[in-house]
Each structure stands twice: as C-alpha cells, then as structure tokens.
Image: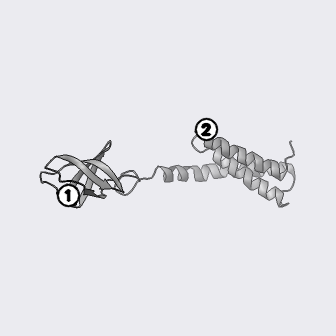
Amino acid sequence: MMNMTGWSWLLLGIALLAIEIIVPGGFYILFFGLSSLVVGAIVEMGWGGPPWFHWLLFSSLSIVSLLFFRGQLLAKIESHTKEGHPIDTMIGEIAMPLEDLASHGIGKVELRGASWTAKNASAIAIAKGQRCRVLLVDGLTLWIDAE
C-alpha cells in the first residue's frame, strides 16, 4: 500500500476539490476532497497512525459524509421559498412606475435600482410613483398591479 504523507493528502484534497469545481458532477467528489483534507490535517498533527489507517479513515469519512450530507446539500441548493417560488424571484416585491400606466398598458418601473419594462395587469390605471406589487415575471417584463 502506498505511504502518503500529510502534505500528499492535503494536495490530493485540493486537487479533488478543484475537479469538483471544474467538472459538473453533482457533489460527489466534494466529499472525497474534504475527507482527504481532514486526513491530511490529522496526519500532519501526528495523530494518523499507520498508513493503512489513513486509507481506512479516508474511505470511511468519504462514504459516511457522502451518504449523510449530500442529500442535505442538494436540498439546500434547490430550496424554494414558502410560496414555492425560486429564491431569487421578484414576485411579491414592490416596484415604482416611472411613468403613468394605462389599464393593461406597458411602461417602465423601477425595481432593485434598475428600470424594467412592466405591464399593468389590472383594469385600473396606475399613476407614476404609485406603489405596485409584481405579480408575474415574463422574461424581462414584470406584470404589476397597484398595491
């Protein structure tokens, strides 16, 4: 069996993490890279024991962390808000019209410091500066309604 020093484990961990970043793989290699870094740190502190134990520890840490934490990581990344909208949605936010908008008319509104094309979704005209709520995002057009 190959005898690896602490630095070898650390370099392997960095290489595996770099591969995880470069290759889209669904967060499998991440846990092997982190386990390698942990084993490298343990070996460098002098707590590693014989080389066979390093490999056993690396394998165990990798598999256990993969089984217990990958699902949680994916769920966190794919999480949605309570309403079921993606995290970075503009639905429900307040926009300010930069011009008067006729009933079902199209104009410009300001939201998050940027100017957006907006469609008045209501049958009532909206005045410039009146608070409006975003109902729908259709491409780059916001559908709004008076608040």
61 to the left or right of 127: right
Residue at coordinates 82% horizontally, 53% vertically from top-left? 6
User: Coloring scheme of the render?
Assistant: one colour
Q: Residues within 10 Å of mark 2 (few under 14, many from 20)?
A: few
| Residue 112 coordinates in the image, percent (x, y) | 36, 57
The residue type indicated by label 1 comes to Lys
**Disc nearer the start of the sequence (2/1):** 2
Instruction: List the residue tagged with mark 1.
Output: 128
Name the mark on residue 23: 2
* Residue 2 occupies quadrant: top right
Query: Can you tell which mark lies on residue 33?
Result: none
23 vs 144, left or right, is right
Tell me the residue at 58%/49% (across/down): 70
Q: Is residue 144 left or right of residue 27?
A: left
Residue farthest toward the front in the current orientation of the protein: 99
Above or below: residue 129 compared with residue 67: below
Viewer-closest of 9 and 22: 22
At numbered mark 2, what does the secondary structure look like: helix, strand or loop? loop
Could you give the CA–CA distance between mark 2 and mark 1, rounded to whole angstroms?
A: 49 Å
* Residue 20 position within the rendered picture, expressed as x and y whole percent measured from the top left: 63, 43
Residue 100 position within the rendered picture, expressed as x and y whole percent measured from the top left = 17, 54
Q: Residues within 10 Å of mark 1 (few under 14, many from 20)?
A: some
Q: Secondary structure at mark 1?
A: loop
* Nearest the eye: 101 or 34: 101
* Quadrant of the frame with the C terminus: bottom left
